[in-house]
Amino acid sequence: MIRFLLLITICSFANNISGQITRKRDVILMGSRFDITIIAGDSLSAEKYIDQVIGEISRIEALISDWKPNSQISEVNKNAGVQPVKVDREVFDLTQRALFFSKITDGAFDISFATMDKIWKFDGSMDILPDAYTIQKAIEKIGHRNIILDSAASTIFLKLPGMKIGFGATGKGYAADRARELMQSLKIDAGIVNASGDLSSWGSQSDGSHWKIGINNPYKPQKVADILSMKYGSVTTSGDYQKYIEIDGKRYSHIINPKTGMPVTGLTSVTVIGTSAEFANGFSTSIMVLGQEKGLALLQEYPDYACLLITDSGKIIRSKNYRRVKNCLKKASIN
């Protein structure tokens, strides 16, 4: 269930007529590019608020990044099969929400997919497929039912030695949501936090117009699949067309089905829109693994979220509630 997020294009055509200024900064956090845009009364204030956003995302990264050896999640992974590890309530709750997606997808979404990170490599170093035995041994360590949570003690225990959990599928969306909440608590009127395609926005551009978010179409690079007009909401895109490997003339997606250990097929990209980037993250990854039919059926149970799918043949499919949820993004907030 390794995941790559397609770029979402932010189109800004606003002229400043309100006395506010727009500042944007690009920074690498959580192993990905974050584009942070803040609208404030002056440049110095806007830059200060961007610093605070970066500080909040860095704080979350230090808690949950499994590639940081001193993070709480790394400690959980080190103690797999040994003992429960006490974690902050924030980390516990994030894990609990991730397990919610495992339950509603019957394991198509699984944060213990991190066990597969050494099996498939998409950095250009892999030129042969992993053998069936290696994949099977890795799969044996995957399973959300072997993640034991104790709410009273705020502990996480991985039952099997060698298990690992990671938040590549929801962590950046969560960070974008938290950054938005922080800015709103400080009465910052508007901004966007874009975590390599996991995006949370609030407020309006400096001229009062909505943010314009373009959803890229990998089959028609010069033409977007859709443009969203947003005030408050979140958008995430999961896809496979920019990160993959080719072996013996066959292309393999970097998005892995945790049940089979093999790359998924059928969908090239899934864009989910709604209130929370964390939840949109979970849904977009889940749908990539579940496929078109099961993915659309899943999302019908959660009408506050909608999706736009692009199949391997280039066909664009929208969920039945797509237009309604798209219109909700134009509002100041979503209840």
Image (cartoon, rainbow, N blue to C red):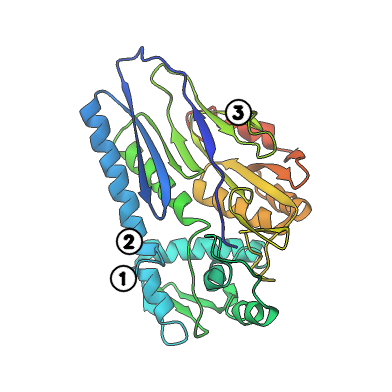
Residue extending farthest top: 17
Number of numbered callouts drawn: 3
Residue at the image position 62 percent from the left and 81 percent from the top: 140
Placement of 147 over or under 65, stated as above or below: below
Residue at the image position 34 percent from the left and 68 percent from the top: 71
SS under mark 2: helix
Residue at the image position 23 percent from the left and 36 percent from the top: 48
Q: Which amino acid does label 3 sit on?
A: Ile
Q: Where is residue 142 in the image (x, y as percent from the top left)?
A: 59, 75
Neighbourhood count class around disc 3 (C-alpha, 10 Å): few under 14, some 14–19, many 20 upward: some
Whether pointer 3 and pointer 1 mark residues with C-beta atoms closer than 8 Å, the reply is no
Q: In this view, does 49 lie to the left or right of 79?
A: left
Give the residue number, with chain letter if any, for mark 1. Answer: 70
Residue extending farthest left: 44
Placement of 313 over or under 150, stated as above or below: above
- The tag earlier along the polypeptide, 3 or 2, is 2
Neighbourhood count class around disc 2 (C-alpha, 10 Å): few under 14, some 14–19, many 20 upward: some
Give the residue number, with chain letter if any, for mark 3. Answer: 227
Note whether residue 142 is visible: yes
SS under mark 1: loop
Q: In which quarter of the view is residue 246 placed?
A: bottom right
Q: Distance between the residues labelled 3 and 1?
A: 41 Å
Q: Position of residue 99 (x, y in %)?
A: 55, 66
Whether pointer 1 and pointer 2 mark residues with C-beta atoms closer than 8 Å, the reply is yes
SS under mark 3: strand
User: Which quadrant: the N terminus?
Assistant: bottom right
The label number, if any, that marks residue 62 in the structure image: 2
- The tag earlier along the polypeptide, 1 or 2, is 2
Placement of 62 over or under 186, stated as above or below: below
Q: Position of residue 303 (x, y in %)?
A: 66, 44
Q: How far apart are marks 1 and 2 (CA)?
A: 8 Å
